[in-house]
Amino acid sequence: MTDKKLDRDGRPRRVVMVDADDPMREIEGDFVWVEEHEQAIAAARADAYAEGLAAGRAEGRSTTVTIRRRRGLRRRLRLIGLAIMALFVVLMLVAILAG
């Protein structure tokens, strides 16, 4: 083991793992370093959060457009004139019926 070959992160390229119950048996397979695993999980978590947030915003709120028409000066004057005439008619009816 004098020839230690390390990867760019300073970790050994080849790692031999043995079984705790039978130390003579090597365990083979693909192994992931804890730091790499945590980085992958954090990236997946951030992506899932952003996706869920976007979906929730799109689903939870619909677009509502309200159009309000402003009354012009002519319409306001006509409305005031009609109100004055209606008041005049009501007062005249009261005066006629009371007299």
Image (spheres, rainbow, N blue to C red):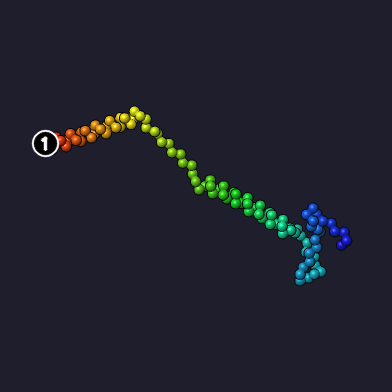
Identified at 20% across, 36% down, the residue is 90
Relative to residue 48, is residue 37 drawn left or right? right
Farthest residue to the left: give it. Answer: 99
Q: Is residue 75 above or below residue 33?
A: above
Identified at 53% across, 45% down, the residue is 58
Residue at image location 79% in from the left, 57% down from the top? 11
- Name the amino acid type tagged 1: Gly
Q: Judge left or right: residue 11 versus residue 62.
A: right
Q: Nearer the viewer, residue 5 or 82?
A: 82
Could you say which quadrant of the image residue 75 lies in? top left
Q: State left or right for residue 66 relative to residue 27.
A: left
Which image quadrant is residue 3 in?
bottom right
**57 in relation to 30, above or below:** above
40 lies left or right of 1: left
Label 1: few (<14), some (14–19) or many (≥20) C-alpha neighbours in 10 Å: few
**Quarter of the figure with the C terminus:** top left
Q: The N terminus is located in which quarter? A: bottom right
The residue sitting at the bottom extreme is 21
Looking at this view, is 27 or 92 the one in front? 92
Residue wearing tag 1:
99
Front one among 72 and 31 = 72
Disc 1 secondary structure class = loop
Q: Position of residue 46 (x, y in %)?
A: 63, 52
The picture places residue 59, in percent across and down from the top left corner, at 52, 47
Q: Please, is residue 66 above or below residue 31 in the view? A: above
x and y, in percent, of residue 6 in the image: 82, 56
- In this rendering, the answer to whether 33 lies above or below 85 is below
